[in-house]
Image (cartoon, rainbow, N blue to C red):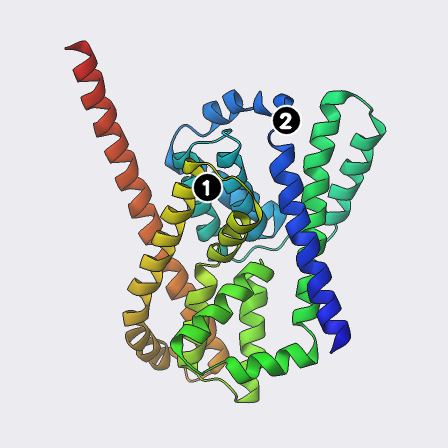
Amino acid sequence: MILLIIKMLMGLILFFAGIKLLSSSMKDEYIKKFKGIIDKVIRNEFIGAALGIIASIVFQNSSLVAISAIILVNSELMSLRQAFSIILGVTIALQLNFNISPYLYTFILIILILFMIIKSKNKKSIVSIVLSYVILLIGLLLINFAMQEDLMSSLLMTIIGKSCFCNILIGLCMGTLYWSSSYSVGILIALSATGYIDIKTISQILIGFSVATSIPILLSNIVTSNLNKEAKKTTLLCLFFNTVIVLIQIPLIKATINYVNLISEDIVVQIVRLKSIFGSNIIIEILILISCLMVINWVINKVWKKRVHE
């Protein structure tokens, strides 16, 4: 019990310290020069979403990318529109099954050491950013290990199935700690084999997993002091969007379960099908939203230019 608490506390301390360090590093004058590059690269919502997907796959953790987007807005390196599109991309990435070699973290550590060897002033700010990501990763890994403890598993088992809200909350936590979609499905399959949870509970957990960007976004707001208006707006917009996704998916649970029951009686097949159906629905909703945002932005620009000419 004591070891579990120590692991959780150490993980949370490192996680919060990483966010603090990343936030202060992004305000460096040298880093602010990258704003022009960011503006040139993220020209529209589709490019932002694509970058969100790629970054999530590379880091293998949606939490890091979502936190980075909020901090970039707070540092005035990124606009609300750009950050929101990246977080939409992160949400899409959560629905996909991608796994990259675990040696990725070793590679990041090697890059950190190489940068530390170079004593240039400009490089120090980059070292600070890389170090903050390493601290964040270590913090998340410690929390991850604590969550795998038998005591924590038994505590979770007492919460699972209590209510729809509890199940969605568990899904949110799983999505925050375990980037891999396939890993989360594996956990649910293992739990279903014990007979503790049914297909309805699993579907509610999967909905929570699908919008797991909510927790890291909230944490970044709590830890980062003096957030500007744009960062707060980005947070509220993302939380509102995730809430809408959950509210859309909940009424579809019964129909989706009936459909997967018709396909197969095997619980493993049913879980995999549920994940793919919920994931596909969310991806479609996000793509529709991005298209609408681009159309609205185009119309606003056209009207604004017309008024300027007049």
Residue 86 numbered tag: 1
Vertical side of 253 occupied by 26: above or below: above
Provide residue 260's location: percent of width, then percent of height.
36, 76
Q: Earlier in the sequence, mark 2 or mark 1?
A: 2
Q: Is residue 255 above or below residue 137?
A: below
Residue 287 in the image: x percent, y percent? Answer: 33, 46
Secondary element under disc 2, as helix, strand or loop, is loop
Residue 157 versus residue 193: which sits nearer the camera? 157
Residue that extends furthest to the right in the rendered view of this protein: 117
Q: Position of residue 53 (x, y in %)?
A: 50, 45
- Quadrant including the C terminus: top left
Q: Secondary structure at mark 1?
A: helix
Query: What is the x, y in percent for residue 296?
Result: 24, 34
In front: mark 2 or mark 1? 2
Left or right, 166 with respect to 34, comes to left
Mark 1 packing: few (<14 Cα in 10 Å), some, or many (20+)?
A: many
Kindly identify the residue that appears in the image at 38 percent across and 64 percent down: 278
Q: Is residue 101 visible?
A: no
Could you say which is closer to the camera, residue 259 or residue 278? 278
Judge left or right: residue 293 versus residue 134.
Answer: left
Where residue 309 sits, quadrant-wise, is top left
Q: Is residue 36 visible?
A: yes
Q: Is residue 231 above or below residue 120?
A: below
Dot 1 amino acid type: Ile
In-front residue for pair 262/190: 190
Residue drawn 81% across the image and 32% down it: 116
Disc 2 designates what residue?
A: 28
Please identify the quarter of the rendering in which residue 177 is found. Answer: bottom right
> Looking at the picture, which amino acid does disc 2 mark?
Asp
Q: Determine the residue positioned at 69% across, 69% down.
A: 146
Return the mark for residue 62. Answer: none
**Residue closest to the far front:** 226
